Image (tube, grey):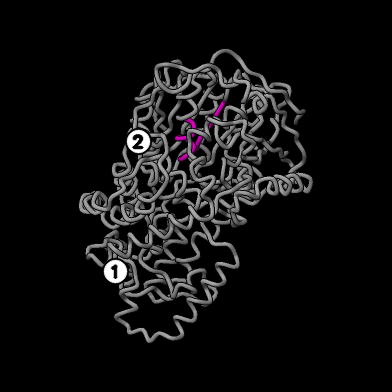
Amino acid sequence: MNRAVRRRPALATTALALLCALSLTACTGGPVPATGKARAADPASRPDLKPFYGQRLQWTDCATDGYECARLTVPRDYARPGNGRTFVLPVARAAATGPARRIGSLVYNPGGPGAGGASSLEEGMDESFGAAVRARFDIVSFDPRGVGGSVPALTCEPAEAEAEAEEAEAEEAEAGAEETSEEASDAVAPLYPRTEADRSAAASGARTAAEDCEEHSGPILRHVGTEDAARDLDVLRAALGERELTYLGWSYGTSLGTSYAEQFPRRVRAMVLDGAIDPSLDWRQRVISQSAGFRRSVDDYAEQCAEIAGDSCPGASPQEIRALIERLYQRAEREPLPVAEDSTYAEYGGMDATAVLDAVSMAMYTPEDQWEPLSEALREADQGDATKLGALDDEEETEEGTEDPGTAEEEQEEQEEQKEQEEDETPEPPADNGDAALTAVNCLDVPHPRSLSPYWDALAPADQAAGVYGTAGVTAELTCRDWPSGGRSPHRVDAEGVPPVLVVGTTGDPATPYAESVSLAEQFPQGMLLTYEGLGHTAYGRGGACVTAKVDAYLVKRERVRPGATC
């Protein structure tokens, strides 16, 4: 699946979007059901898990004023929690603005998979929440296992020395080669690999990507799935001193919340899942669902560009805009679109068709912020300069960055922890390892075929349903073919005993199509659906006063949303 990350609302001042406190002792309640009809005993009662459930969070000032940071230790393998191998996860919080009426902590996940929650909070994500919620709750988030400031963290990139050696080899090969224009054209990956050569190249590239991840993050690859992250969420609940969890998840955060509700249904106080992912879909159904969502959103852009982007639109009619975008895809498949020397894409010779498609797709998340710059970038790309098009996601990369928000004291603890885990031999992760985490979690969570034929068989249906968005989506899934297998499989929600869960769906959502929100709400016992009639990815924090009022009333008062509720 493509990245589905919560975007920063326009009102956030310090950046992105999402968290007084004394150290709190773990607080646990009665038996906790696990997924399935035969519910397991409360994990907090297991002797080998008690050290994790009994830990205290030591809060200190974050690097950003107004936020507090801590670290949570969780077992790397919940089947063997006493083996000494752990993840240490950054946690951040913004204290309730009305402490006299404080209800407790509200934990959120901003999306991804691969987005760091602690860093997103320091960047201002608490501003996404309504005033009523900020007054009554400490807003809390954390970097999931393997993500961002997690120790250890995922990386699929070669170590620096190895990367430099590879770069030198590549430069040497390039210097000694006399490429013809035809050979250069053959090096450009098509959005729909039709020939045997194109398919072989796509499969080979995907295999190399999977091997890089296995080589550099092998010891933790099997331990970064959503089921384990949901168990970490329960350890965090206890460390916050909460008997029950109040939770809000955007996008991928809905998968994390669903998994928590299935494993710990009677630990849920209130849960909002905004921009839902349907757990009953297999890999192929997910690709087609999301790809069709992006295709519809690009059509919406062509139809409504003038209304939102005004005079900057790159065409006088929807037909002209669609033709321009298609023209750029075709042009980029023949030869990368030119960019300036200081562009991120300069080292690749320009923007290939996949890069152009990614830039257009990512601009669908927040039309109110992104359609105008997209329009200007498309116009200039059509005139021969794709520099602005390539720079469209630069701000998002900054916002979604996973820089560790810890203090100097915490950095020392991290270094000591890293020394203890030297046997893993994993290189230092990049400042933003979101792409590695995106691949790792998606591949581990959803079973994928091991043979190539199911992927090639999926190309034609994906093309029919979503055009190049569908075929590119299928090709992107090839990396998962060589990935370690996780324990999950497509299934309908099994969360007997969970209180009413509120699912929020946006009718024009590109990344998490509305139909999946409808389906998820139906699968939850007493599930509620709030529909936001609008464009863009997710609704709470950007869908206006109506959405805010209904979600806040549910989170604060557990006020139910009536069937058919629409904003």
Residue on which disc 2 sits: 516
Q: Residue, x 50% and y 19% (percent of image)?
A: 559
Which numbered disc, 1 or 2, marks the residue that appears first in the sequence?
Answer: 1
Is any atom of residue 316 visible in this view? Answer: no
Q: Are marks 1 and 2 in contact (CB under 8 Å)?
A: no
Name the spot of residue 552 as percent of width and height, x first: 55, 27
Tell me if residue 250 is in the magenta stretch. yes
Name the spot of residue 212 as percent of width and height, x first: 48, 58
Residue on which disc 1 sits: 330
Name the spot of residue 291 as percent of width and height, x first: 32, 49
- Tell me the magenta residue range: 246-257
Q: Residue, x 64% and y 48% (percent of image)?
A: 13
Against 525, residue 259 (above or below) is: below
Tell me if residue 153 is in the magenta stretch. no
Is any atom of residue 160 visible in this view? Answer: yes
Q: Which amino acid type is shown beneath numbered disc 1? A: Gln
Against 460, residue 72 (above or below) is: above
